[in-house]
Image (tube, rainbow, N blue to C red):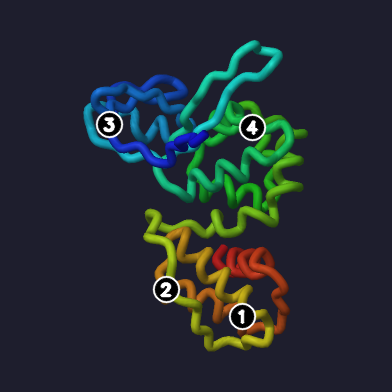
Amino acid sequence: MVVAVLTKVRGIVEAVADESLTVRVDPFAIEVLIPEHTRRMVQSKVGEPIELHTIFYLEGGPMVGRLVPRLIGFLSAIDREFFDVFCSVDGVGVRKALRAMVRPVRELARLIQDQDVKLLSTFPGIGEATAERIVAKLRRKVGKYALIVGTEPALGAAAAESNGAVENAEPDVIRDTYAALLSVGHTESQARQAIDRVLAGKKKFKSVADMIEAIYLQSR
């Protein structure tokens, strides 16, 4: 059996509700769940075209008695990717994650990177215990999202050419860090310069997470 998975929807914003919007893709009208920050950005765009990067999932379970197909939509692929990471934390389900995403992904990632449990715990549905779990599980995984700049560019580029001390990191680590920086909006020049700066020191980088964290700390 072949199952179609919707990863992108283009249409006209027909209506915006508290937790969703309706996209008209003639002859259909599709309800798409959206994060709170996205809702605020699109609530004045009724009647205008929109493109959403989507995730398909089934809501409900055996205890509920039925499974309801749902679409979740994001304004960029990188926001969709962050949402997947965010939902990997125990106690952070789809609905809770959508309500909690009241700020841009870059800001959420920076709070997690900075281990700001106090502020995270004030977000809708995120108490102190959940905020601590988020920080504990994701602090080393959200570095690239904290470095988001501008809008999402096309992904994919050649391997980085660095003038730094390459012996401080394996070529694969440098290449993958370079690709991660491009994916969140850095130009090729900005990505190379950021990598060069951290490689100029004496620290050894064994993983992309190590290098991304060092770049983030330098950019603060």
Residue 194 numbered mark, or none: none
* Element at label 2: helix
How far across and how far down the image is residue 185, in percent? 42, 61
Q: Earlier in the sequence, mark 4 or mark 1?
A: 4
Residue 171 numbered mark, or none: 1
Point 72% across, 31% down: residue: 91
Q: Earlier in the sequence, mark 3 or mark 2?
A: 3
Amino acid bearing label 1:
Pro
Point 52% across, 34% down: residue: 1
Q: Residues within 10 Å of mark 1 (few under 14, many from 20)?
A: some
Q: Is residue 165 left or right of residue 7?
A: right
How far across and how far down the image is residue 18, in percent? 44, 20
Q: Is residue 168 above or below residue 220?
A: below
Q: CA distance from mark 3 to mark 2?
A: 33 Å
Q: Earlier in the sequence, mark 4 or mark 3?
A: 3
Q: Which is nearer the eye, 204 or 54?
A: 54
Query: Where does label 3 land, which residue?
Result: 45
Amino acid bearing label 4:
Thr
Q: CA distance from mark 4 to mark 3?
A: 29 Å
Q: Earlier in the sequence, mark 1 or mark 3?
A: 3
Q: Is residue 29 above or below residue 90?
A: above
How far across and how far down the image is residue 55, in percent? 49, 37
Residue 188 numbered mark, or none: 2
* Element at label 4: loop
Amino acid bearing label 3:
Lys
Q: Is residue 154 left or right of residue 102?
A: left
Q: Which is nearer the eye, 136 or 218?
A: 136
Residue 37 showing in the rendered view: no
